[in-house]
Structure formats: C-alpha cells, structure tokens
Image (spheres, rainbow, N blue to C red):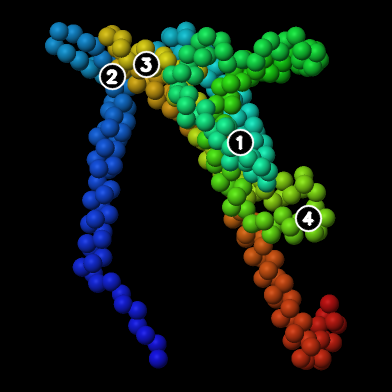
Amino acid sequence: MKTKKNKPSRYFQKQQNRLGYLFFAPWLIGFLIFTLFPFIYTVYLSFHRVNLNVLGWTTTFNGIDNYVSALLRNPDFTPALVQFFITELIYVPTILIISFILAILLNGNFKFRTTFRVIYFLPVIVISGSVMNQLMSSGNVQIGNVQNIFVYQIIESYSRELAEVIVFLFNNFALVLWFTGIPIVLFLSGLQKINTNLYEAAQIDGATSWQILWKITMPIIRPIVLVAAVFTVVSLGMFPINPVYGMIQNAIFDTVGGLGVASSYAWIYSLTILILIGMIYFVLRDNSKEVYVVDERKAQAEKEAKRIARMNRQNPLKKMFNRKAG
C-alpha cells in the first residue's frame, strides 16, 4: 500500500514565500536606490548640459551634444578609448591563458598542493587595488628590461608590433599575475568537477594528453572560461590602468557641464564594455545544444535502423522485398 506524502499547506507555502521576500527586500531596495535609479538618471544627464551656479545644479537639454563633444571635440577621450580597447584585447587572453595553465598545474596530485594554491591566491587578498596602483606608479611591477634579451631581439626582427606587446606585458607582469587570482579559483572549481572516468576512458582508447585537453577538458571548461573572461574585462575596466575610467572621474568634478559630459563618457565606455563582452560571448559561446540536436538525430536514425532490422528478422519475405527495392 502506497503511503501519501505530506504536502505542505498553502498557508505554510505563503509564509515561506513571505520570509523569502523579506530576506530579499534589503538587496532589492539597495539595488533600486543605488543602482537602478542612478543608471536611469545617468541616461537623462547625458542629454543635458549641467551647470553649477548660486542656485545649485541646473540642467539644460542639449540633445547629443555631449556625445559629439566626447567623440569629436575632445582630443583625449577617443584615443583613451582606443587605448583601453587594445589593452583589454592584450590583457584578457594573457590572463586567461596563464590562469588556465596555473589551474591545471595546481589541480595535479602533489605534496603541499594546498600551500601552493594559497601562495598564488594570497596576493589577491593582501594587495588591494590602491596598493597595486602605488606599485605601478613606483615602477615595481615590471620584470627587468626584456629588450636586452636575445629572444626579444629575434622577435623584434620579425614583428615589431609583437615585440611591443611583449614589452608591455612584461612591464606589467605583476599586474597580470594579480588579476589571475579569481580566474584560477574558477578554473580549479571547474576542473575538479570533471568526471575522472572520462580521462581514464580516453587513455584506454589511446588518446594523448593534448587530445584529452582539447577534446574533453576544454569543451567542459568553456562556460567557466566565458565567466572568467567577463569578470576580467569588468575588473580591468574598473582599474586605474584604464585611462577612460580616470577621465570619467575627473569630468564628474567639473563645474561646467561636468555631470552631463561625464554621463556621456560613461555610456560610451559602457557600450565599449558591452561590445567586448559580446565578442567574448561570440567566441566562447557554448554550442552543446547544436551537438545535442545532431546526437539526437543520429540516435533516432540508429533506433529506426534497429527497428527495421528487427522487423526483417521476424518477416523473411519482407526482408527479400526490401532487398529488391534497394
């Protein structure tokens, strides 16, 4: 005899829902006041000229004049925006590659593994953004002068642009390692969730380590790579290395049209960030749904073939007819 499970009453469910909304309310109120309202008000200010006089702040509608001033009249904003875009394109792949390599090494089975993980993640906790900014200002984040290295001279003889990128990375290598802290944790979490039976089955089938990396590890870890890439883009955008971020902060305190111009700076900058995130999503998007559809069609075809073979075994005459028709 089956026993009926005791279902919670409607009153109990409503009470639980109220408690959930009650715990959720402080965050929701803070989001509405400190995030959503400034977000909408920034759109309003970007289309107005904001002045400070004896009567306080006054706004005058000027259309897209702030955006025109930012992109065409200001000689510093557009070059800073281009510099930020190029910096992101250089930093983000480098940080992700180094983070992934370190995560694979730290995920291995060796002595004092936890100690090494703490060593790699400790600078993220101890060194704050302001401390790292002071280290950058004093020139203590670079690793010597790489221009005197023989390998660098060979690379420079073939591609001067690539050599400049290498110099740029080595001059800020401590900053690159500092930004790898959170991505390493994300990659470690993803690597530890991969079923080890997949690796064992691949090794039994004769797959090499390189094939296992590209055929098993990378497809499974791809969603985490996307999250780490978006996190890195946003973190770099909020760091003082970004020249646009400093221009927005300086424009806020300008008494002549400061808030309006700063709002237009912020929206152009936000659009650039969204373009970068869109590019990352296009490159790292998960195509598992398409693979699943192909696998489902293949499984359906195999199932249909088995059904026809079973029917042929049951009816020999039908089997002969199918051969003649083929």
The image shows residue 190 at horizontal and vertical percentages of 58, 47
Q: Residue at x 71, y 81 (%)?
A: 307
Cα–Cα gap, marks 4 and 2: 65 Å
Seen from this angle, which residue lies furthest left?
Answer: 55
Dot 3: within a 10 Å radius of its alpha carbon, few (fewer than 14), some, or many (20 or more) residues? some
What amino acid is labelled 4 in the image?
Answer: Gln
What amino acid is labelled 3 in the image?
Answer: Gln
Do residues under tags 1 and 2 come within 8 Å of each other at their CB atoms? no
Q: Which mark sits nearer the N-terminus, 1 or 3?
A: 1
What amino acid is labelled 2 in the image?
Answer: His
Q: Quadrant of the C terminus?
A: bottom right
- Left/right placement of residue 271 relative to residue 250 reads right
Dot 1: within a 10 Å radius of its alpha carbon, few (fewer than 14), some, or many (20 or more) residues? few
Q: Nearer the viewer, residue 280 or 25?
A: 25
Residue 48: numbered disc: 2
Front label number (1 vs 3):
1
Front label number (4 vs 2):
4
Do residues under tags 1 and 3 come within 8 Å of each other at their CB atoms? no
Q: Nearer the viewer, residue 132 or 301?
A: 132
